Image (cartoon, rainbow, N blue to C red):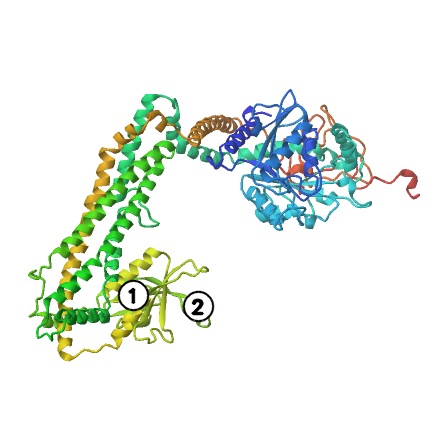
């Protein structure tokens, strides 16, 4: 062939095919290959069996090929077959090969004629084959058979498209000659992914079954539906021949005899048939690999660089070495500690761009969720006044009091302070959950050692739970300290004398907050009727006085402005049809909020966004709705009917201002101290524990050798990386030799030897009157003994050329003198007299 390296290309790709199939997606390379595509009963299986010379493929009704079969043909002195999933086992009986294909297919797809994209790799070694790799794909079907799913046709098409859509894949489109070529499923699929026909090779089967008086000459001469790589005709065994166990060698002889004797095909008999197809496919695949060699080598190099460092770590790796286990345990614990601290404290590397996590999530809990939970505990205005009036009356008892009792102030304040315990405990719970999530995220790097990961998570989580109890006790203690002494001499407390004056100043300061922007962002208005366009997304701007929304974030076209007076917010149950989280704003006086709508339903993509918007609305004075029970509803009804005399009203107003002033002091203190306490008792303590004590805890937990036992997946991964690394290095080495020799010593130009009758000189039979020899202008007959002329472009495509040049145009410029053109010449006895 002129280049031994080129001859080794197909076996090399076979090795890569095996390696990459066994390791899954570790090396996602598009290996050059030939995919066999055709409808059911198109003759695909018979073509492959003719290549091998043996009956080895399953046969029957319905879809026979239900998994892709990667068939690797290797030229060898002996004859045997082996499967990739049965390494080391040689099959010399090809009936056993067929049974193994059926068993392996059923193992993955079941016995219900389902299909699977997982390939079966079969290698056949034989002296009767050329190096070739083909992928036999399931035949295209129209109607489900048996228990097949209703969309079996679409499943098969999708599977075929996965293979043939790759630019590195040649398409062997098999079409029976006794059907209309224009309706060929194989050619239609090939045209979808290869509209120029650059990668498609046509195979016409069942030429012997065409109706009498018809032939496929125009198709085989590449005139009807031309392909860049042309067509080749084959004749397979009939079903009767298969049932009668007709020998494939005899079938190949019958095929050759058919082409030599058929009047429409005998002039191109040397370019038809299974041996010719096998030889051409071998050359086409070799040339295709050569053409895709630069891009293929680049992919190999990038894959090699990607696993070079990992392979270096695994080389010489001894899993049972005690010193290695100790060193790796120290490294793993140190890495876990560093990752945990980075996630809590923040870091420039390993940034999560999808969602908040770690320290950012805890910061949100401290400054958005916790203040929101505190405000939820505040009393409603009417309820507060009712409680104050009852407290004043109960303190006076039977007497009519002249002065405002300070005991009523203390009773109301203590009741409000006690309510702060619930949000404080909830804040701890939220922080704990986030800490545990962070531990799990950091321990994901320990998945190579499942025992170490499990023990690390157990130890750190147990410590977090231990600190949980202490943190909650400390927070409750802080609330109890607030209850123990009501400090009315605090510098920020207004006192009785200034209560009324401070109230009016507060109202003025609140009204002067003006148009301070609190938040901006996208929200979806969910309760717009379908007649008006349905749910729409707008750009919302929240200020201290209003909620406005615009068409987009340029804020040029304002759609609506909603004042915040008398508004409250409540949750809306998520619809099972919607993926968004919803909350709504409503008017406490039962007025319409937006046009004809009593409520304004706003939707966000996540619950975190809902909580953040509710917290921002809280800063603007839009409070959450109180959840009322039956008892509270009854008390609310009585309070609505409750009336106070002017003197009691003044006392209630005074106590109300005093409670607001003192609770503002307490809330400020709680908002400041609770995050600090949680940070000190939990977060910093957990960090210190991981840095200082986790390693000692792991050593005391049990046998270190057991902790550092690697998972089975890790062991497989190591073997796969080393095997892949070796395969890539070997491939690059061979490809480098091939590339160099191909460029430095180019092959001679291909020639057309079809005009030569033998190895010696040229035949010169007398020209036939019915088949005159035609030459182009300026062309002269070659002298006797002259070298054959170089091949020239012709209309037939490369497959009708010599075996050495499948890429060159194929039709010779002159017809062979010994072969008639289309029909045999008329017999002399039938010629009319002159």
Q: Residues within 10 Å of mark 2 (few under 14, many from 20)?
A: few
- What number of labels is visible? 2
Q: Quadrant of the C terminus?
A: top right
Q: Quick check: 622 above or below 361? A: below
According to the picture, the residue beneath numbered tag 2 turns out to be 534
Residue 346 appears in the rendering: no
Q: Quadrant of residue 35?
A: top right
User: Residue 143: horizontal and vertical position, in percent?
Assistant: 67, 50
- Lateral position of residue 21 relative to residue 256, left or right: left
Which one is in front, 335 or 313?
Answer: 335
Q: Quick check: 700 above or below 66? A: above
| Mark earlier in primary sequence (1, 2) | 2
User: Residue 657: horizontal and vertical position, in percent?
Assistant: 14, 69
Q: Quadrant of residue 568?
A: bottom left
Which one is in front, 347 or 238?
Answer: 347
Q: Quadrant of residue 594?
A: bottom left
User: Residue 723: horizontal and vertical position, in percent?
Assistant: 46, 27
Which one is in front, 10 or 687?
Answer: 687
According to the picture, the residue beneath numbered tag 1 turns out to be 626
User: Residue 362: horizontal and vertical position, in percent?
Assistant: 26, 49
| For the residues bearing labels 1 and 2, Cβ distance under 8 angstroms | no
Q: Quadrant of the N terminus?
A: top right
- Lateral position of residue 601 relative to residue 125, left or right: left
- Lateral position of residue 744 relative to residue 248, left or right: left
Which one is in front, 105 or 273?
Answer: 105
Q: Residues within 10 Å of mark 1 (few under 14, many from 20)?
A: some
Label of residue 746 in the image: none
Q: Calculate the distance from the C-alpha at mark 1 to the C-alpha at mark 2.
A: 30 Å
Residue 17 appears in the rendering: yes
């Amino acid at each position: 062939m002129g280049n031994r390296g080129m001859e080794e290309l197909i076996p090399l790709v076979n090795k890569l095919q095996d390696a990459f199939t066994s390791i899954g997606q570790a090396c996602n390379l598009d290996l050059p290959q030939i995919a066999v595509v055709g409808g059911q009963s198109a003759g695909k299986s018979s073509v492959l069996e003719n290549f091998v010379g043996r009956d080895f493929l399953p046969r029957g009704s319905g879809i026979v090929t239900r998994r892709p079969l990667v068939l690797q043909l290797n030229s060898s002195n002996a004859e045997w077959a082996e499967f990739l999933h049965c390494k080391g086992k040689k099959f010399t009986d090809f009936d056993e090969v067929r049974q193994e294909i059926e068993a392996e297919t059923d193992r993955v797809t079941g016995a219900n004629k389902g299909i699977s994209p997982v390939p079966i790799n079969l290698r056949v070694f034989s002296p009767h084959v050329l190096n070739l790799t083909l992928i036999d794909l399931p035949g295209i079907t129209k109607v489900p058979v048996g228990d097949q799913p209703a969309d079996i046709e679409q499943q098969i098409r999708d599977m075929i498209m996965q293979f043939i859509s790759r630019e590195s894949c040649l398409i062997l489109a098999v079409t029976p000659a006794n059907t209309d070529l224009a309706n060929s499923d194989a050619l239609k699929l090939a045209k979808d992914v290869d509209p120029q026909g650059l990668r498609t090779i046509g195979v016409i089967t069942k030429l012997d079954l065409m109706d009498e008086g018809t032939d496929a000459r125009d198709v085989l001469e590449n005139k009807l539906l031309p392909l860049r790589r042309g067509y080749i005709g084959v004749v397979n065994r009939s079903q009767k021949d298969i049932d009668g166990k007709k020998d494939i060698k005899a079938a190949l002889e019958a095929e050759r005899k058919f082409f030599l004797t058929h009047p429409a095909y005998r002039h191109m008999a040397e370019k038809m048939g299974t041996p010719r197809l096998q030889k051409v496919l071998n050359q086409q695949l070799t040339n295709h690999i050569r053409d895709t060699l630069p891009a293929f080598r680049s992919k190999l190099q990038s894959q090699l660089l990607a696993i070079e460092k990992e392979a270096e770590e695994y080389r010489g790796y001894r899993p049972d070495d005690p010193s290695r286990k100790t060193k790796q345990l120290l490294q793993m614990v140190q890495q876990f500690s560093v990752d945990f601290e980075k996630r809590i404290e923040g870091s420039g590397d390993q940034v999560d761009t999808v969602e908040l996590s770690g320290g950012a999530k805890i910061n949100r809990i401290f400054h958005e969720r916790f203040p929101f939970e505190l405000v939820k505990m505040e009393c409603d205005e009417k309820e507060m006044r009712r409680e104050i009036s009852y407290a004043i009356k109960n303190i006076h008892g039977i007497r009519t009091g002249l002065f405002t009792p300070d005991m009523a102030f203390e009773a109301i304040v203590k009741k409000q302070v006690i309510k702060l315990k619930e949000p404080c405990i909830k804040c701890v719970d939220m922080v704990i959950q986030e800490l545990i999530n962070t531990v799990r995220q950091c321990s994901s790097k320990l998945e190579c050692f499942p025992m170490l990961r499990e023990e690390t998570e157990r130890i750190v989580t147990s410590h977090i739970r231990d600190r949980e109890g202490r943190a909650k006790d400390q927070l409750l203690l802080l609330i109890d300290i607030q209850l123990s002494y009501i400090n009315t001499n605090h510098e920020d407390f207004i006192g009785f004398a200034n209560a009324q004056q401070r109230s009016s100043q507060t109202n003025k300061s609140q009204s002067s907050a003006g148009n301070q922007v609190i938040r901006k962002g996208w929200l979806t208005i969910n309760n717009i009727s379908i007649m008006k366009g349905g749910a729409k997304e707008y750009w919302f701007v929240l200020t201290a006085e209003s909620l406005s929304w615009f068409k987009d974030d340029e804020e040029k076209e304002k759609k609506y402005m909603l004042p915040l007076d008398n508004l409250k917010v409540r949750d809306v149950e998520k619809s099972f049809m919607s993926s968004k989280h919803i909350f709504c704003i409503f008017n406490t006086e039962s007025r319409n909020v937006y046009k004809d709508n009593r409520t304004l339903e706003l939707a966000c993509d996540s619950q975190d966004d809902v909580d953040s918007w509710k917290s921002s609305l809280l800063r603007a004075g839009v409070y959450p709705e109180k959840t009322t029970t039956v008892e509270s509803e009854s008390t609310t009804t009585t309070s609505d009917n409750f009336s106070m005399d002017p003197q009691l009203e003044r006392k209630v107003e005074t106590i109300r201002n005093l409670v607001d002033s003192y609770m503002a002091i307490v809330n400020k203190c709680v908002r400041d101290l609770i995050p600090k306490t949680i940070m000190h008792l939990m977060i910093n303590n957990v960090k210190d524990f991981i840095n200082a004590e986790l390693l000692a805890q792991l050593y005391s937990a049990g046998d270190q050798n057991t902790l550092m036992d690697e998972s089975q997946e890790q062991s497989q991964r190591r073997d796969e990386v080393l095997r892949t690394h070796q395969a890539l290095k070997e491939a690059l080495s061979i490809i480098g030799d091939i590339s160099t020799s191909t460029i430095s010593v180019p092959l001679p130009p291909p020639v057309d030897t079809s005009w030569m009758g033998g190895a010696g000189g040229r035949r010169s039979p007398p020209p036939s009157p019915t088949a005159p020899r035609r030459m182009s202008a300026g062309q002269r007959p070659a002298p006797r003994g002259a070298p054959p002329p170089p091949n020239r472009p012709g209309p037939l495509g490369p497959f009708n050329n010599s075996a050495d040049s499948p890429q060159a145009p194929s039709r010779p410029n002159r017809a062979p003198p010994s072969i008639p053109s289309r029909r045999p010449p008329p017999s002399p006895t039938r010629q009319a007299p002159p």
